[in-house]
Amino acid sequence: MATFEPGHLHIERHALNEDDYSFNLSIEYAVSQDPEAGMLFKLHGTVEDKELNEEFFLPKDQAFDFARHATRIAQNYGLPKNASITSVHKEYDLMFEDIRAQLDVKSGDPVKPEHLE
């Protein structure tokens, strides 16, 4: 289950059996100009009933990679290493478009090579 509103994505997954996993996470985000233009993300909620509350910053040209960063953080809190939090495509598409609009990103905008290292 997922819900989206500009600046906030909530995703929830309930374990189907004892071998499955669950999480209840919110990703809040806003444009940040310090020290460079980009997006500040706040990930909070629970993974397997373990509290999670972390922030991360992604530069403008990397902001669309938020799901990989959020998944990695969730894995540090108990999400299985082969699992991801990206199964809610409609809501992620809405979030991508909101991030694009907030950061004024256009198709073909360059990526800084130092961000690829």
Image: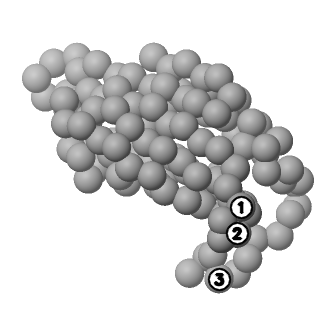
Residue at (43% x, 42% y) in the render: 43
Q: Does the rendering let one see residue 90?
A: no
Residue at (15% x, 18% y) in the render: 17
Mark 1 closeness class: few <14, some 14–19, many ≥20 residues within 10 Å: few
Contact, mark 1 vs mark 2 (Cβ under 8 Å)? yes
**Up-down relation of residue 75 to residue 50 (above or below):** below
Residue 39: percent from left, percent from top: 64, 53
Residue 47: percent from left, percent from top: 26, 35
Residue at (28% x, 32% y) in the render: 46
Query: Can you tell which mark lies on residue 33?
Result: 1
Q: Amino acid at mark 2?
A: Glu
Q: Amino acid at mark 1?
A: Gln
Residue, disc 3: 114
Separation of residues labelled 1 and 3 (CA atoms): 18 Å
Query: Which element type, helix, strand or loop, lies under badge 3?
Result: helix
- The disc, 1 or 3, on the residue closer to the chain's N-terminal end is 1
Which corner quadrant of the image does residue 44 belong to? Answer: top left
Residue 75: percent from left, percent from top: 29, 49
Mark 3 closeness class: few <14, some 14–19, many ≥20 residues within 10 Å: few
Q: Amino acid at mark 3?
A: Glu
Query: Can you tell which mark lies on residue 79?
Result: none
Residue at (56% x, 81% y) in the render: 117
Residue, disc 2: 36
